Image (cartoon, rainbow, N blue to C red):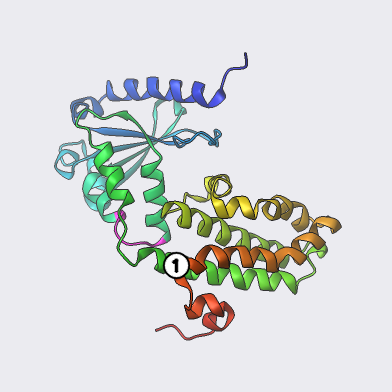
């Protein structure tokens, strides 16, 4: 039987976490620290991408008791990126206060942080903080989803309309940028509609393919790399399917947002001056 590389990686990272917490200066805080494995996320479809990443969460009062090299960035900004022993994983240390502030609102960074926290594996949690933190990451303001999906839909619509007017098979920088913008906006839209947030870019397409909208436009996403690289058949199909892809996104939004001007005419909405 072939060993699961993702599970082998998780097993090694759990051992590394124990070793980390036995070393100074972290050993002094091991009875209170929360350590999360955030890369790879704790979802069945996730494959190992790059170096594993750990997040350690401490209270600000605890951070102030660290040696100056660790204390100063945590007191100043609430976050410390540090080189992990043996270079087998990345380590980010944050204060609980800083991560709480970062979860406020719905900018892209907050949505990515929400998704990361909600799909992290607790490796060390003596005070049972992980569940509380994940609940906080799942709470959104009442109007938050519309504030997120509106610009994503407008971005996707304008990029898809631009693709229909662009000779994709020419394989130039412009088409690559437009295709990437369309795909990223649609993937984020699909994730937000399904889960209220979206992952960082490295897991974006994988996560989007698991959503209802992502599954409906999956064949279009599958052909996009070939189209962007100049393969004529794929380019023609991608361009001709842009209208249908936008229709799928519109239908996914219509039940909740029917009658919104941004949904009815996204190109006109995009031309409005900002307030």
Name the residue: 24% across, 44% down.
95
Q: Position of residue 85 (x, y in %)?
A: 39, 26
Q: Position of residue 63 (x, y in %)?
A: 19, 40
Q: Is residue 255 above or below residue 68?
A: below
Name the residue: 28% across, 37% down.
130
Residue 54 located left or right of residue 245 = left
Question: Going by the picture, which residue comes out furthest to the right?
Answer: 232
Depth check: give the residue in front, 223 or 211.
211
Q: Is residue 234 above or below residue 117?
A: below
Is residue 173 among the parts visible in the rendering?
no
Assess disc 1: are there few (<14), some (14-19) or many (≥20) residues with their C-alpha within 10 Å of its C-alpha.
few
Q: Position of residue 103 (x, y in %)?
A: 31, 54
Q: Is residue 210 above or below residue 30?
A: below
Total residue callouts: 1
- Quadrant, the N terminus: top right
Quadrant of the image occupied by residue 264: bottom right
Is residue 185 among the parts visible in the rendering?
yes
Question: Label 1 belongs to which residue?
Answer: 256
Q: Is residue 67 magenta?
A: no
Question: Going by the picture, which residue comes out furthest to the front?
Answer: 255
Secondary structure category for the residue under label 1? helix
Name the residue: 70% across, 51% down.
219
Quadrant of the image occupied by residue 65: top left
Q: Which residues are magenta?
A: 102-107
């Amino acid at each position: 039987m072939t060993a699961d590389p993702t599970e082998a990686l998780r097993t090694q990272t759990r051992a590394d976490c124990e070793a980390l917490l036995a070393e100074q200066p972290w050993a002094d805080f091991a009875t209170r620290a929360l350590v999360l494995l955030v890369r790879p996320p704790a979802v069945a479809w996730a494959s190992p991408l790059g170096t594993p990443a750990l997040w350690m969460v401490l209270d600000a009062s605890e951070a102030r008791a660290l040696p100056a090299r660790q204390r100063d960035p945590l007191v100043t900004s609430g976050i410390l990126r540090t080189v992990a022993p043996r270079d087998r994983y990345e380590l980010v240390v944050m204060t609980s206060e800083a991560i709480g502030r970062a979860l406020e609102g719905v900018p892209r960074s907050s949505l990515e942080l929400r998704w990361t926290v909600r799909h992290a594996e607790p490796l060390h949690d003596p005070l049972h903080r992980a569940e509380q933190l994940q609940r906080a990451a799942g709470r959104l303001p009442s109007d938050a989803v519309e504030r997120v999906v509106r610009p994503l839909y407008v971005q996707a619509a304008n990029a898809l309309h631009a693709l229909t007017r662009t000779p994709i098979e020419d394989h130039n920088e412009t088409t690559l940028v437009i295709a990437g913008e369309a795909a990223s906006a649609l993937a984020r839209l699909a994730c937000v509609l399904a889960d209220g947030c979206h992952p960082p870019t490295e897991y974006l397409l994988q996560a989007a393919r698991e959503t209802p909208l992502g599954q409906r436009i999956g064949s279009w996403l599958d052909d996009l790399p070939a189209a962007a690289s100049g393969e004529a058949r794929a380019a023609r199909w991608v361009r001709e399917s842009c209208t249908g892809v936008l229709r799928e996104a519109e239908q996914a939004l219509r039940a909740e947002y029917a009658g919104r001007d941004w949904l009815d005419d996204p190109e006109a909405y995009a031309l409005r001056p900002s307030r």
